[in-house]
Image (cartoon, coloured by chain):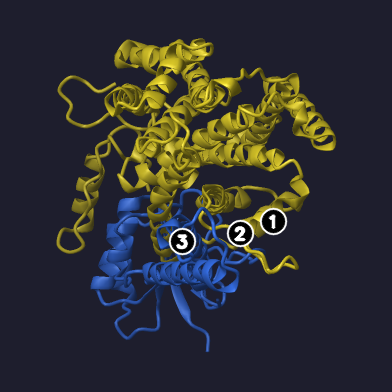
């Protein structure tokens, strides 16, 4: 089933912010918005739920740290205990620095991998751009036309209010085949 | 700049840029053929790098007996250089992570190059302990892996092992942070490059970035996470470096002030290196409107603040030695200032605490030549700081019969100079192939210090009215839709 999209182009940050908010408030379904840089407040304007990546970061950080504490304890107190300067075998305070470093390493690397995974980015992936200038200066708003609330006249009126530069209709695969 | 009555800060980026202009300006350096200045700098750096490589090959094949070390002074030039380079790296993380968390938008013009500096500086730093091992091909013994010697595990109680993990983590996180920050910019270059090998290569590196708002949202979250992780990381790295010294029982090393003192010193030295590099880069690459006098001014202030902290640490150290009543500790400090290597102590104090005080003056901070010269002095002073801490503490220990002097050999000096070759070769290649300023981040702060356009409300008002109010606020050449 091919889906139809209304693709509108903007030149300013404020316009894309306003247009996205207006579309959402009008009950239309925003397929996605494309911007050349991170526009602050756009996630709220689009009504996107907050990213869950911090939990991945926390979980993997804690796991990494816990693993390292266990590993240090196992190597120095269980597998081959060695007396170093008369210190106890399970000298936990001395394990803190490496545990911290490993925790940071696990948390940092895993959160980036998780990000690439959920954003579906990988080396060699072909970028499907709604407009060649998105990575330069263009802001693009893609609205799904399938909704019952989609009223072309009303939508075009709203878009005009936000200084839309150009409006196009496109059919599936170009935008949202991913 | 800002008039006396304006409460708005001066714009971060000069020249009323539009996003499209930002892309064009920053990519201009990548599009044009390298200038003769670049070639001269590159060939010179590369030649120095080759000298360094030859020296390293020589000392590894002959052994590190080629160094000027003796029984008493077992650490000297190499560890000085190691701490020096690691310290330089720290300013990059300060700018990219700590200033990000502190919401300092001016960081966007310098973070990319400062992060690059971090990575190259850590590479230079990492070489020294590896060479110091004497048998660098066994460097992997530092890893805790199951081996045929038992398994004999590494000693996790040793600060040198902590250091290994700290540097490894620091390098990895710095590279990831740098690369992740670069992905949107690589996509920008990809989309303005003609189809061909270069474009395909950029396509692979930019991971199929399409500027989707969902991706941006996750991206910003990850960036914040990494900044939050890198901030304690950078503090931990230099703290652990200082523990290499502080956990020993050498007078002059065995103090609790060492970690904060090292961290402040690291940021001080790194900031002066950033200043040195950006002052040259902005001029030679024509980026004066992006890295403005205002940016230099702010970095000078950070350098001044950390320089003063360092001055306080120098005084505290002396006071603690006096107050401790420990005669070995007292001797170590008097020997530092007045002993045979006292000259190095006074170079350190003169450069770090003395000359840096000039940065209190606005006129000095606005004079880029003066800032450049001061930054070079600080770099020299900070190198001597590590030399003073390491060598003066060691060369006269508890037993006067074992006192010794230390003079570096030409091999040691050539190795150190060689790392500068490595650093600058990498940095010049970076200037050539990567946008030196974070394009997408700069676009995000273009409106800082400028009047913002009034956002038309989502409801009410007729289109024509809202259009009128919408454009009114925009000063300068507004780009019409």
At 43% from the left edge and 47% from the top edge, which residue is drawn? B236
Chain B painted colour? yellow
Task: Say which element carries label 2.
Answer: loop
Decide which of A122, B143 is in the foreground and name it: B143
Task: Say which element carries label 3.
Answer: helix
Q: Position of residue A26 (x, y in %)?
A: 24, 74
For disc 1, the neighbor class at 10 Å (few under 14, some 14 to 19, many from 20) is: few
Label placed on residue B154: 2
Q: Tell me, yes or no, whether the two marked residues, 2 and 3, touch with CB atoms within 8 Å.
A: no
Chain A painted colour? blue
Q: Establish whether labels 2 and 3 are both on one chain.
A: no
Asked whether, in this view, residue A63 is left or right of residue B357, the answer is right
- Decide which of tag 2 and tag 1 comes sooner along the chain: 1
Q: Position of residue A7 (x, y in %)?
A: 44, 67
Residue, disc 1: B141
Asked whether, in this view, residue A178 is left or right of residue B315, the answer is right
Q: Establish whether labels 1 and 3 are both on one chain.
A: no
Residue, disc 3: A99
Asked whether, in this view, residue B183 is left or right of residue B350, the answer is right
Q: Tell me, yes or no, whether the two marked residues, 2 and 1, touch with CB atoms within 8 Å.
A: yes
Task: State whether residue A62 is above or below residue B248.
Answer: below
């Amino acid at each position: 089933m091919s889906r139809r999209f209304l693709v509108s182009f903007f030149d300013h940050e404020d316009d894309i912010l306003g247009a996205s908010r207006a579309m959402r408030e009008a009950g239309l379904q925003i397929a996605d918005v494309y911007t050349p840089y991170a526009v602050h407040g756009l996630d709220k304007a689009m009504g996107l739920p907050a990213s869950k990546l911090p939990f991945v970061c926390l979980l993997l950080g804690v796991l990494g740290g816990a693993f390292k504490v266990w590993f240090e304890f196992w190597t120095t107190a269980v597998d081959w205990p060695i007396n170093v300067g008369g210190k106890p075998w399970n000298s936990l305070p001395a394990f803190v620095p490496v545990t911290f470093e490993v925790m940071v390493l696990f948390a940092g690397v895993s959160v980036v991998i998780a990000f690439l995974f959920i954003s579906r980015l990988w080396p060699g992936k072909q970028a499907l751009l709604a407009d060649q200038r998105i990575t330069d200066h263009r802001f693009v708003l893609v609205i799904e036309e399938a909704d019952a609330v989609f009223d072309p006249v009303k939508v075009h009126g709203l878009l005009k209010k936000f200084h839309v530069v150009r409006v196009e209709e496109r059919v599936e695969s170009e935008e949202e085949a991913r | 700049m800002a008039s006396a009555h304006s409460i708005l800060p001066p714009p971060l980026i000069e020249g009323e840029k539009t996003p499209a202009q930002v892309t064009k300006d920053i990519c201009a350096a990548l599009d044009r053929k390298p200038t003769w200045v670049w070639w001269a700098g590159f060939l010179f750096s590369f030649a120095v790098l080759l000298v360094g490589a030859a020296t390293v090959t020589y000392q590894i094949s002959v052994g590190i007996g080629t160094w000027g070390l003796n029984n008493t002074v077992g650490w000297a030039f190499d560890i000085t250089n190691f701490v020096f380079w690691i310290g330089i790296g720290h300013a990059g993380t300060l700018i990219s992570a700590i200033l990000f968390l502190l919401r300092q938008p001016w960081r966007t013009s310098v973070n990319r190059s400062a992060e690059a500096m971090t990575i190259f500086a850590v590479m230079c730093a990492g070489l020294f302990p590896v060479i110091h091992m004497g048998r660098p091909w066994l460097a992997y013994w530092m890893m805790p892996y199951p081996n045929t010697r038992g398994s004999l595990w590494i000693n996790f109680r040793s600060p040198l092992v902590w250091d290994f993990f700290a540097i490894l983590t620091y390098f990895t996180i710095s590279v990831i942070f740098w690369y992740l920050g670069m992905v949107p910019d690589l996509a920008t270059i990809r989309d303005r490059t003609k189809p061909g090998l270069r474009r395909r290569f950029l396509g692979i590196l930019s991971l199929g970035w399409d500027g989707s708002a969902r991706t941006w949202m996750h991206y910003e979250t990850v960036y914040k996470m990494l900044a939050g992780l890198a901030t304690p990381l950078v503090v931990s790295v230099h703290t652990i470096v200082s523990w290499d010294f502080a956990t020993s029982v050498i007078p002059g090393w065995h103090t609790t002030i060492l970690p904060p003192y090292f961290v402040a010193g690291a940021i001080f030295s790194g900031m002066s290196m950033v200043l040195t590099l950006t002052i040259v880069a902005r001029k030679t690459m024509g980026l004066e409107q992006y890295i403005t006098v205002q940016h230099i001014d702010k970095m000078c202030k950070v350098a001044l603040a950390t320089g003063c902290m360092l001055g306080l640490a120098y005084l505290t150290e002396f006071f603690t030695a006096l107050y401790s009543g420990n005669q070995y500790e007292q001797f170590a400090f008097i020997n530092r200032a007045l002993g045979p290597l006292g000259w190095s102590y006074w170079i350190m104090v003169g450069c770090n605490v003395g000359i840096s005080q000039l940065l209190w003056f606005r006129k000095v901070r606005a004079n880029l030549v003066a800032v450049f010269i001061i930054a070079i002095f600080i770099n020299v002073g900070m190198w001597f700081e590590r030399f003073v801490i390491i060598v003066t503490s060691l060369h006269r220990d508890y037993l006067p019969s074992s006192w010794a002097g230390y003079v570096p050999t030409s091999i040691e000096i050539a190795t150190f100079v060689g790392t500068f070759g490595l650093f600058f070769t990498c940095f010049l290649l970076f200037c050539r192939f990567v946008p030196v300023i974070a394009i997408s981040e700069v676009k995000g702060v273009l409106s800082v210090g400028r009047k913002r356009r009034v956002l038309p409300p989502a409801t009410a008002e007729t289109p024509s009215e809202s259009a009128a109010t919408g454009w009114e606020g925009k000063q300068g050449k507004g780009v019409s839709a």
